[in-house]
Image (cartoon, rainbow, N blue to C red):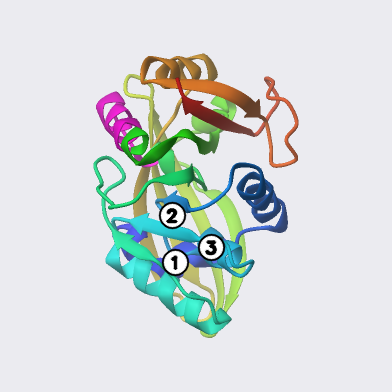
Amino acid sequence: MDLYENNWLFDLVHNDKAGEAQINFYRRQIERFGEPVLELGCGSGNYLVALSQNLHNIAGLDLSEEMLEAAEKKADAEGVSTDLHVGDMRNFEIDQKFKLIFIAGNSFQHLLTLDDARSCLDSVRRHLFPFGRLIIEIFNPSLPLLCRPSDKRHFIGEYRTDQGWVVVTENVFYEAATQINHIDWHYKNQYMKEEQTVSFKMRQFFPQEFDALLGANGFRIDSKFGDFDESAFDSRSPKQIVVVSPA
């Protein structure tokens, strides 16, 4: 089962809304760099809907129609309008240019090959104003987490639903040759004793590799943060958050 075809399973773990620190970070960047804004890989709208509540001119693009339907429902519930597009961030066409494009929630890591990443960056450049900015947010890879035994389940969390408490555990298998982490999330309903498993993959981008990838594909790094408080990136940072402009 594919995680991104089951928006309620995705939202269960991601707490249905992006956190205050993340939203405030992107609000600051929108105020800094201007509108219109495009979120790539917007999913079920956790970021997009929250940012749209501040009347920001923000569009969203995602490959999953189910995720976009969920985003539209969230927007309707909050009384905000949406400008949503079905498309693949690796190669998309929107008849508009943007002052800011961002890829939040580690979505860039679903681009599993360097060719996918390059193609995405090419599409972004076509849609940015010359003075525009791109922001990408990804993990800073943790080898201890990646190299956990693949035959053991690891606890993610316990979540309340209308059907009772659901416990989520995961197995991971990190393929070092491709830098792809293969992840299975297991959802077990504690009342009904039913379990569902969803699978997904995340490509790991190591810090120097990530910087070089951006530079080789026509972008200049303006800032690199280690977290949403805009602290400088270092070895202990949980995130790599880059603000880049066309070179």
Residue 15 vertical position relative to residue 225 in the rendered view, above or below: below
| 3 inside magenta stretch | no
Q: CA distance from mark 1 to mark 3?
A: 14 Å
Examine the image and state in which quarter residue 90 appears.
top left
**Sequence-first tag of 1 and 3:** 1
Local crowd at mark 3 within 10 Å, few (<14), some, or many (≥20)? many
Name the quarter where the C terminus is drawn.
Answer: top left
Which residue is label 3 attached to? 46
Q: Give residue 130's position: percent from left, percent from top.
A: 43, 32
Judging depth in this view, the residue of 85 and 226 nearest the camera is 85
Examine the image and state in which quarter residue 166 appears.
bottom right
**Sequence-first tag of 2 and 1:** 1
Judging depth in this view, the residue of 98 and 120 nearest the camera is 98
Which residue is label 2 attached to? 185
Residue at the location (63% across, 26% down)?
223
Instruction: Kindly identify the amino acid type of the residue bearing the numbered disc 3.
Output: Asn
Which residue is label 1 attached to? 9
Instruction: Kindly identify the amino acid type of the residue bearing the numbered disc 1.
Output: Leu
Examine the image and state in which quarter residue 2 appears.
bottom left
Q: Give residue 99's position: percent from left, percent from top.
A: 49, 44
> Is 50 situated left or right of 84 in this image?
right
Local crowd at mark 1 within 10 Å, few (<14), some, or many (≥20)? some
Q: Secondary structure at mark 1?
A: helix
Give the residues in magenta.
110-123
Query: Which tag is nearer the camera, tag 3 or tag 2?
Result: 3
Residue at the location (58% across, 27% down)?
144
Q: Secondary structure at mark 3?
A: helix
Instruction: Kindly identify the amino acid type of the residue bearing the numbered disc 2.
Output: Trp
Q: Secondary structure at mark 2?
A: strand
Q: CA distance from mark 2 to mark 1?
A: 10 Å
Query: Which tag is nearer the camera, tag 2 or tag 1?
Result: 1
